[in-house]
Amino acid sequence: MLSLTFIALALLAMTATTKWTAPTLLEDFGENFADLFTVYRDPATSVSHVIVGMWHLTHYLYLAVTDEGVVLHKVSFREESPKAAIIKGAGDGKHLFLAFVCCNRDRFNFTESADGGKTWSKPVGILAPEEKSVSFQDMVYVPETGRIYLFFIKYFAKEIWMMSRAPGSIIFSGATLVGKDAYPYLFMARASYTRVQSRTYLHVAYIQASGSAMIYTRSENSGVTWSVPKEIAQSESVRYVTGVLSDSQFGPWVYVTYVRHDDNMGRMIYSSDHGAKFSAPIMTTTARTYSDPAGMALCTGNPAVRQLASLLKQFISVPEFAIWNATTLKPEYRAQPYVQPYADTTGIDCAIDKAGKRTITTFAVIYDGYAYKLFAAADTEKL
């Protein structure tokens, strides 16, 4: 019956070389509404770290899951009305960082683990300066420097701000204005980084509150100062920003993915020069979509193989999976299975080892008419 309660995540309509594990039920939430917020796959251990929010049970649930669907450990963080969370890692199999909205959106909490998610520090509340209502947007971890950046929007001022934490410190400080006229709801802005020699470039794309345009700004000095915000994706009215994707492995490339407002179609624009110029929009879906924040992922781990993996939830609950060549920006293959019941939220991550073996991990919260359930599946193949 798993095929009737799992959205399939393109598991059966792929190429002949693709072999997915059977969908595994990780958690049954009953009638309690659950939302999958974020997925991070640690390249050092091949363990995926997943955060789900349960509204009626009033807490965030963290799970560490192997590619075979085995839950190694899980931890609950109690919080009224969980709204958003982001998890990132150092890529060393040990250090994880988790930020989540708390306290009816007047601030957010930060906690970390030094043992791969078995135990977590006591959450530290981070209050945005001079603002009691904030909309948490994204977290960026830069492994080369060990610095962590948190991005949020002041709800009433409609300003996007950043705070950061130096390695070895427990305090986030240095609140810096990134941009103005930002749409103040959750996940309307996304961020990432690239490296230029010893410098960290930070990249932020967000939706303009007054006109729904895609606005981009960058910092060339680790967030101390920011460029004048400019419109990218010209003449596009944007509904969701689904990702700003880049890291040191992908060099100067920055990918911005989004859903357009008028037709609900997924699109992507890219820069090959650290955000100095962006391409024209490229269609990433073949049907209308309602994507969640984890719609696209870099396949990291092997600089010789540069790919993107996307998983976007379609308007009629059809999940569309695709693998993209990250240089030509052409899909290598895609699939559109239709499986009832409703697919609420999905998450994806992708990694390629030094031997050229790619592993894709997929997660979905499913409502089957009786209960909300969290499923997982993975695919590993030699490229």
Image (cartoon, rainbow, N blue to C red):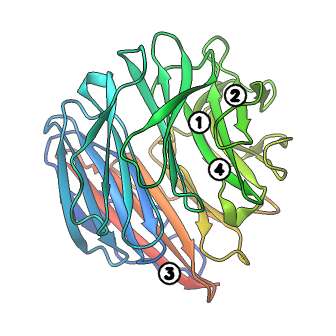
Instruction: Report the residue marked by disc 2.
Output: 214
Labels 2 and 3: the sequence-earlier one:
2
| Residue ID for mark 1 | 241
Taking the image as drawn, is residue 332 in sight? no
Closer to viewer: mark 2 or mark 4: 4
Q: Gap between marks 2 and 4, in whole Å?
A: 18 Å
Q: Amino acid at mark 4?
A: Tyr
Q: Earlier in the sequence, mark 4 or mark 3?
A: 4
Left or right placement of residue 77 versus residue 334 in this view: left
Q: Residue at x 73, y 58 (%)?
A: 198
Residue 287 shown left or right of residue 346 in the figure: right
Would residue 270 be found to the left or right of residue 105 on screen?
A: right
- Marks 2/3 in contact by CB < 8 Å: the verdict is no
Q: Tell me the element at label 2.
A: strand
Distance between the Cα atoms at labels 2 and 3? 35 Å
Rendered position, 153 above or below 333: above
Q: Is residue 63 left or right of residue 284?
A: left
Q: Which residue is mark 4?
A: 193
Q: Earlier in the sequence, mark 1 or mark 2?
A: 2
Element under disc 3: strand
Which circle, 2 or 3, is nearer the viewer? 2
User: From the viewer's perspective, is the residue at label 4 or at label 3 nearer?
Assistant: 4
* Residue topped by disc 3: 380
The amino acid type of the residue labelled 2 equals Met
Return the disc, 3 or 1, that comes first in the chain's sequence. Answer: 1
Which amino acid type is marked by label 3?
Answer: Thr
Q: Are marks 4 and 3 in contact (CB under 8 Å)?
A: no
